[in-house]
Amino acid sequence: MTGIPFPNIDPIAIHIGSSYGIRWYALAYLTGFLGGWFYGCYLADLDRDRRPSREDIDNVLPLLVLGVILGGRLGYVLFYNFSYYMEHPMNILAIWEGGMSFHGGLLGVVVVSAAYALKHKFHPLALGDILGTVVPIGLFFGRIANFINGELFGRITTVPWAMVFPHGGNLPRHPSQLYEAFLEGLCLFLVMFFAARNPVIRRTTGLLFGIFVTGYGVCRFIVEFFREPDQQVGFIFQYFTLGQLLSLPMIIAGMYLIYYARKHKTAA
């Protein structure tokens, strides 16, 4: 055995009595939503002559929370474990047992934000630009929580920083959750942060959202080469994972959004 010891951090951050507690995973969601809300309001204030406004960010936040949770859960049910949940439909509601899909959560956010923007008569991609800039905050803390829980670990490896995860057998594995926190969280946040500082990019409707969608798809596709595929799904075409197949449409859609935004800006 090689590698470094896995830090056995208690998944429950705050114990309430002997039977209840607040988990790090819940705090990660809370931090992501609050961080995204504050940063989103800041971005809205940079261009006060355009929608969405700070008020729009305040109003849409509860709907986005609902979209993330429902979309993430339904995405996991449909994409990753459909046969099981068809046999046990009541377990679909048991989100505390785990099982959330980012791709499903993103679809939930897209539906909610598009509906809100159309109802309030401004371009849906204008809201998408802000959301794409703040989402990496939640991704970073979410992946750190995955690491603390010892879930979504990587494939078996001999790299010096490999770890033996509590539920991953006796062989050292890639800490792929930390790879994702670095790429999907920190790196993508920095890319979006500096892109949003450019007034031309920020005011080109759809461009920031296109950069985010493309960037996440590329980061996720790369990390999936190190991440252990879900046991109930396994490898697809003997080499690729479901996460990679779901990321390919994101890359294509993101590149099209970038093209669309630039063409629309040039025409304007």
Image (spheres, grey):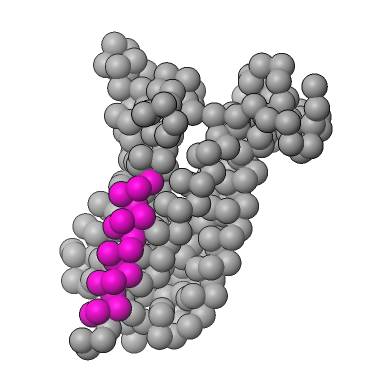
Find residue 84 and report its image quarter: top left
Question: Looking at this rendering, what residue extends furthest in the front direction?
Answer: 238
Does residue 1 sit above or below 218 in this rendering?
Answer: above
Question: How many marks are shown on the rendered structure?
Answer: 0
Residue 16 visible to an observer of this rendering: no
Q: Is residue 108 left or right of residue 150?
A: left
Residue 191 visible to an observer of this rendering: yes
**Where is residue 138 drawn, in percent x and y?**
53, 51
**Where is residue 216 drawn, in percent x and y?**
45, 54
Q: Residue at x 49, y 75 (%)?
A: 195
Q: Split into 4 quadrants, where in the image is the C terminus?
A: bottom left
Question: Looking at this rendering, what residue extends furthest in the top direction?
Answer: 87
Magenta segment's dominant SS is helix
Q: Residue at x 34, y 60 (%)?
A: 254
Q: Residue at x 66, y 16 (%)?
A: 169
Q: Is residue 55 left or right of residue 121?
A: right
Find residue 57 and report its image quarter: bottom left
Find residue 78 and report its image quarter: top left
Q: Split into 4 quadrants, where in the image is the N terminus?
A: top right
**Where is residue 153 drawn, in percent x and y?**
60, 31
Q: Is residue 78 left or right of residue 3?
A: left
Q: Residue at x 61, y 38 (%)?
A: 176
**Where is residue 10 drawn, in percent x and y?**
72, 29
Asked if the magenta segment contains residue 207, the reply would be: no
Task: Report the magenta residues as a range.
Answer: 247-264
Does residue 248 sit above or below 230 in this rendering?
Answer: below
Q: Is residue 1 left or right of residue 54?
A: right
> Which one is in front, 254 or 109?
254
> Which one is in front, 63 or 231?
231
